[in-house]
Amino acid sequence: MGTSLPARASSDLLLPAPQPPLTHLGATLLRHVVVTGLRYTLYHLGLPLPDKAPIRIHELRLYLDGEALDRLLASAAGGPALAGALSEPGGVAATGERAPRGAVFFHRQRLRWARRRRLPGSRPPAPRSAESLEARLRRHLVEHLPALNDAFLDETLTALDRRRRRRRGADLQPCLGPAAGAWMRGHDAPLTGLGPPDAFRRSWAESPVAVDRPATPLGADGGRGRFREVYRQTLDHLRPHLGMISDSALGRGVTGHRDDIFFLPFELLGDLTREDKPQWLDGAVLSNRAEYFGLVHGADEATLATWQASPLNPLL
C-alpha cells in the first residue's frame, strides 16, 4: 500500500507518531472510519465535502493530507481554521483566522454529553452462513459510527480551540485521552480503549504491556485522545466477528491461515464469503504479508518499544 506521502501529511490529530504499521485490513478499516468521521465533521460545520478523501496510506500508516485540506477549505468561511486544526493541531491559529460560527458552539455543548455515551455492546455472532457473518460485522460497525463520528468531531473542535488559545499566548502542554491519562496516573482505566489501532493486535485489556508510568503524567483537554480510544474499543467489539468470518473461510478452503483475513482490504471481505476461491487471493495475501512483516521485522528493539507505548503518545 505504497502511495507517496505528501509534504504536509500528518497523523498528529488522531494517531501521533511513532505508530506501528497496520495490517492491510487495519489500514483500510481505519481509512473507512476516518473518511466517515471527516465527512461528518465537515457536513455538521457547514463546510464543503471532498470528492476524493484527503487521506494517504504510506508504509501502512494513515495520514491526513494537509495540502488537499487547504485546497478544499481555502475559500469557505472558517475553512482555513479548520484545515489547520485537522492537519496541524499543535500549531497556532493565524491572526484574523476565524472558526466556523454557530455550529461550533452548538456542537461543543452537545459533545460534553456525548463523551459519556456508551458504545454498543460486543455481541459475538451466532454461527450462520458466511454472507450473514459479513453483513453482521458491517452492521455492528455501523452501530459504532455515531460514537466514532462524534469523537472525530470532538478531536477537531478541541484542536481548533487549542490553536486559538495558543494565539492568545497560552502555553499549552501536550495532553492525553481519558483512559490513557487515568492509566498513567495509576488509576483504574478501561484498558479496552488502549492498544494498537488494528484488530490484528489485542487491546491492553486482553494483552497487558509493560510501560513505565511517568512521575508527572499529562492531563486531559476536552476531546483530545477520544477518537483513538473509542476506535480501539470498537476494534475489540469487531474482533469476534472477524474471527468467525476467518474460521468460515478457512473451513471452506478459501484461505489457508486463520489470520489471512488481516492481509486483505476491508472492502474485499465479501470475497471471503464466496464458495469458490478467488484466483488472486493467495498472491495478494502473500504480497501483503511480506509488506507488513517486512516493516515489523525491520524494526529494532527500541522502535518496537515505542510502538508498544503508542497509545500513550502525547497529543498536541
Image (cartoon, rainbow, N blue to C red):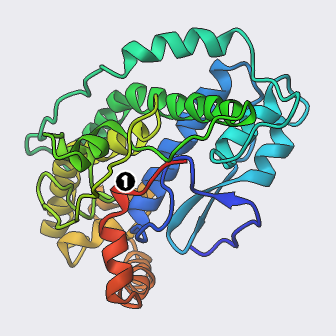
**SS class of the residue under badge 1?**
helix
x then y, percent, for residue 209: 17, 65
Please, is residue 245 above or below residue 200 in the view?
Answer: above
x then y, percent, for residue 299: 40, 87
Which residue corresponds to mark 1?
270
As rendered, which of 219 and 2 lies closer to the eye?
219
x then y, percent, for residue 170: 64, 35
Residue displayed at 8% across by 40% down: 126
Q: How many marks?
A: 1
Please, is residue 297 above or below residue 143 in the view?
Answer: below
Q: Is residue 136 left or right of residue 96?
A: left
Please, is residue 71 above or below residue 154 in the view?
Answer: below
Residue displayed at 87% across by 33% down: 95
Residue displayed at 76% across by 45% down: 69
x then y, percent, for residue 224: 47, 37
Q: Residues within 10 Å of mark 1 (few under 14, many from 20)?
A: some
Residue 171 is at least partly visible in this image: yes
Residue 234 is at least partly visible in this image: no
Please, is residue 151 above or below residue 107 in the view?
Answer: below
Query: On the image, which quarter does residue 187 sit in?
Result: top left
As rendered, which of 187 and 108 lies closer to the eye?
187
As rendered, which of 310 and 184 lies closer to the eye?
184
Picture quarter with the N terminus: bottom right
Residue type beneath disc 1:
Gly
Residue displayed at 45% across by 31% down: 151
Q: Residue furthest right?
A: 75
